[in-house]
Amino acid sequence: MSKQILCLPGDGIGPEIVVEALKVLDVVKSQFDLDIEVSEGLVGGASLDAHGVPLTDEVLAVAKKSDGILFGAVGGPKWDDQPMMNRPERGLLKLRSEMGLFANLRPAMLFPQLAEASSLKHELVAGLDILIVRELTGGIYFGEPRGVRTLENGEREGYNSYVYRESEIKRIAKVAFEAAQKRGGRLTSVDKSNVLEVTALWRELVTEMGAADYSDVELSHMYVDNAAMQLVRAPKQFDVMVTGNMFGDILSDCAAMLTGSIGMLPSASLNEANQGMYEPVHGSAPDIAGQGKANPLAQILSLAMLLRYSLGEIEAADAIEKAVSDVLDQGLRTGDIASEGCTQVGTTEMGDAVVKCLQVL
Ligand code: NAI
Ligand code: MG
C-alpha cells in the first residue's frame, strides 16, 4: 500500500520552501522506487483566510490518516490582531495535541562547511551532529496540580507539578533508543535524579530498558546542569540525548544556537503510531517572504527526517542529507548562511542544486 504524506505549507516562506522539498521528494521517489502519495492542505493564516479557522476538521482528518506531515511554517503580521484562539499558531498546536505528538526530535547538525556561522570555535562545532529527543506532552508544563494560591498570611505562592508516569517515560525512551540505533548507537539520558524523585524514576526505567531491550545502544546518564555545561564545552561528545519537556526545551534551544544557522535546522514530532509532523525549526520569516531568498534546506532536511523516522526509508534520507552537504561543498549559500568566497543563490536555485546532486549520486 502506498504511504501518504500530507503537505501543509502554511504562510510566509512556508509555501516557497515546501515546493523545493517536494521537488526533492519527486527525485528520491523515482530513485529509490518509493510508493508515496502526496496531498496538500491549508493551515495557519492561509486556512484562516479561506475558511475562518487555522485548521479545518477536514485537514485534521487527512492528517490523522497520513503517515507523515510535511509542515512549512505559520503566522505573520497579517494575522497578529486575531484573538488568541484563532491565531495561525493554533493550527499547529491543535495538530500536535489532536495527534498526540509526544516525542519532539530536534537535531543540531552543523555541516562542516558552515562552521564559521557558529558563535563557537570551529573545531568545537564543525561536523556537530546531535539529536535531542524531548518529551513534549507531559512533565512540569502539564502536571497537576498547578496554579497560584494565597497562603494564610496573605502571601501568594505559585506552584507546578513535575509528573511523569511510567508509560510516558517508557514511550519517550523507546523513541530515543530506536533513534540511537538508526544513528551513532549512543544515548545520553538527562535528568536531575539527585534532587527530583520523578527523574530518579526516569533514570531507573531508562536503565532497565537499556539492559533488557537495547544492549546494542551505549547508554549513559547525565545531570541536566552538567549536560548544559558539556553541550557548550564539548558538544560533539553526544549522539542522541533524551530528556523531559522542560529540560529538553532549554537544551534544544541551546544546541540549536551552537550551529548558528536557523535556516538549516529540521525537527520532528512523533506519536505512538510513529506518525510524525516534520517542520523547520524557524518560523514563516515574513521579512523575506515572497522575495525568493529563503533557505529551503531546513525544509528539505525535514523531509529527510520524515523518510527516516516515519517511513523507514533510511537510504533515501541519507541520500538527501548527502546531497545537501554536496551543495554546500560546491559553495552555494542562501543569504542567511552567506560567507566570503561563496556563491549566493536564491530559494529555487538552492532546491535545484540539491536535486542535481541527488541525480548524480
Ligand atoms: P522566524 O524564524 O520566522 O525568523 C527569524 C529570522 O530568521 C528572520 O530574520 C528570518 O528572515 C530569518 N529566517 C528564518 N527562516 C529562514 C530561512 N529559511 N531562510 C533565511 N532566513 C530565515 O521567526 P520570527 O520572525 O520570530 O517569527 C515570524 C513568524 O513566524 C511569526 O508569526 C511567528 O509566530 C511565526 N513562527 C512560526 C513557527 C512555526 O510555524 N513553527 C515557529 C516560529 C515562529
Ligand atoms: Mg523553546
Image: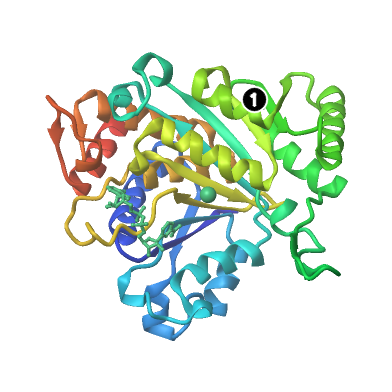
Left or right for 249, reference 156: left
Please indicate whether residue 201 sits to the left or right of residue 147 in the image: right
Instruction: Please tell me which residue lies in front, 272 or 80.
Output: 80
Q: Give the vertical position of 207 relative to 42 (above or below).
A: above
Which residue reaches farthest top? 123
**Residue 116, position in %: x, y?**
28, 24
Residue 242 falls left or right of residue 360 = right
Q: Secondary structure at mark 1?
A: helix
| Picture residue at 44% right of the left edge, 72% below the top | 88
**Residue that appears at 77% across and 64% down:** 146
Q: Residue at the bottom extreme?
A: 52
Residue with the mark numbered 1: 226
Q: Is residue 322 visible?
A: yes
Q: Quarter holding the C terminus?
A: top left
Quarter of the figure with residue 66: bottom right
- Residue 187 point in image, percent of width and height: 67, 25
Residue 360 picture quarter:
top left
Query: How far from the left and from the top, in percent, is residue 218?
Result: 71, 18
Mark 1 and ligand 2: say if the CB distance to the nearest ligand atom is below 8 Å: no
Task: Report x, y in % for residue 344.
Answer: 14, 37
Q: Quadrant of residue 175?
A: top right
Residue 308 seen in the current view: no
Q: Label 1 sits on what residue type?
A: Asn
Residue visible at 62% across and 39% down? Answer: 133
- Exactly how many numbered labels are in the figure? 1
Taking depth in this image into account, of 268 and 315 the one nearest to the observer is 268
Q: Eyeballing the image, is 193 above or below 244?
A: above
